[in-house]
Amino acid sequence: MRWLSAMSTALAVYTLVTPVAAGYEELPPAAGWASATASAINEAGQVAGTTGSPSRRPVPGYTYGVRWDGRTPTVLGGGDPAGEAYGVNARGDVAFSIRLGYQGISYVNFVVWENGRLSSRTSPVWSAENGPVGRDISDAGVVPMAHRGKAGTWREGVFHALPLPVEAVYTDHRAVNAHGTTAGAATLDGSFVFHCDVDECTRLPSAGEGGSYRVAAISESNAVAATWTVGATTRAVLWTGGRPAVLPGADAVVSDHRRAVSESGDVVGSRRVDGVSRATLWRNGELVDLGAAGTSVAVAVNDRGDVIGWQRDGGPQRPFHWRDGVLTLLPAPAGVSVEPADINNSGVVVGGTRGETPSRAFRWTVAG
């Protein structure tokens, strides 16, 4: 592999539609367990998440990775003491971690459930202590990860370390698009953002002087969204065609989500205004305040331009859906905080309760 410079340009296009009412249903935990958490959904509607027993100190809880097909949960693995799902691809493969504590040390095995069985996706040359850190899985099963300054990618069941320079410290490498192009950040004479395909890696131009980057997501057209931190200031940045654009709005962060950037170049996250977090969309390089009440965050955006997020205004946290300038609160049980976790391109949203024991998982279907 080799490092390249990226200099081409890209054009963003979007379509707006009108939102309508949403229905919702609860996704049940697996038989014999009390809790359920929904984390991700694919285009077929399969949902990845977690099921198990809640933690009640001093006795730890036991959680398992799970996939729902319709309302039927399949337990994938975990449990001693914890399994946590992160993503599900078009084939229905689920990426999740199994965490084990031993003598005060946390050991993590990142695994993928595919073809009805578990396959390890922890590097054969890295220690499992306090890592590794992974999140996304491509439609072909590509899984990027980073751990203790090193980074690599699983492709077709084989682990590949990222290319030279070996002296770089890889701080972030979790984002991958459906085609298997990964993205992350590293430090070598300053912080930089990169993306890699099967044969080569591209080092992207910096957004400005100094600081560090946290990559959130990469689109199918290789647009990369990241948060850029310089001192106490944070800004949202989008690279399209390899060229960086610092998006408007100070004290802004890009959502840490695989759908933080859409195919049209929409980017979601939040910014602080008078000390309060405000749900924010950047569209065509312009800042759009979503109009949520109180404290709010935009979580994800699909390729139709639908945005999901949450708001909290003197009561429990409430999930919302935004489309074409109209924000709609999603239905949820009264008196509990609920947060959306993911949305697919058909407008199906998944999420669940926050801060409740046991946790509950929900699915919303937004028509239109």
Image: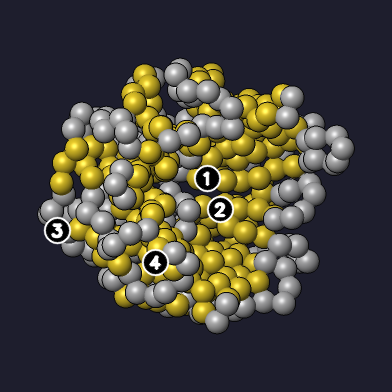
Does residue 207 appear left or right of residue 154 in this picture? Answer: left
Which callout, 4 or 3, points at the residue further toward the start of the chain? Answer: 3
Tell me where residue 153 sits by quadrant: top left
Residue 162 percent location from the top left of the image: 31, 30
| Front residue (pair 102, 77) | 102
Disc 3 residue type?
Thr
Going from N to C along the chain, the mark reached first, 1 or 4, is 1
One can see residue 30 in this view: no
Q: Residue furthest right?
A: 58
For the residue pair 102 and 338, the one nearer the viewer reads as 102
Read off the residue under disc 2: 341
Q: Foreground: 332 or 78?
A: 78
Per the image, the residue denoted by label 1 is 40
The quadrant where residue 329 appears: bottom right
Location of the C terminus by quadrant is bottom left
Tell me the distance, in whole angstroms, between the alpha carbons under discs 4 and 3.
21 Å
Q: Are marks 3 and 1 in contact (CB under 8 Å)?
A: no
Q: Please tell me whether mark 4 sits on a helix, a strand or a loop.
A: strand
The structure residue drawn at horizontal position 38% and vertical position 26%, both measured from the top left corner, is 154
| Front-most of residues 8 and 336 | 8
Helix, strand or loop for disc 2: strand
Distance CA(mark 1)–CA(mark 4): 26 Å
The correct choice, above or below, for 74 with respect to 229 in the image is above
Q: Quadrant of the N terminus?
A: top left
In the picture, the disc for residue 311 is none
At label 1, the amino acid type is: Ala
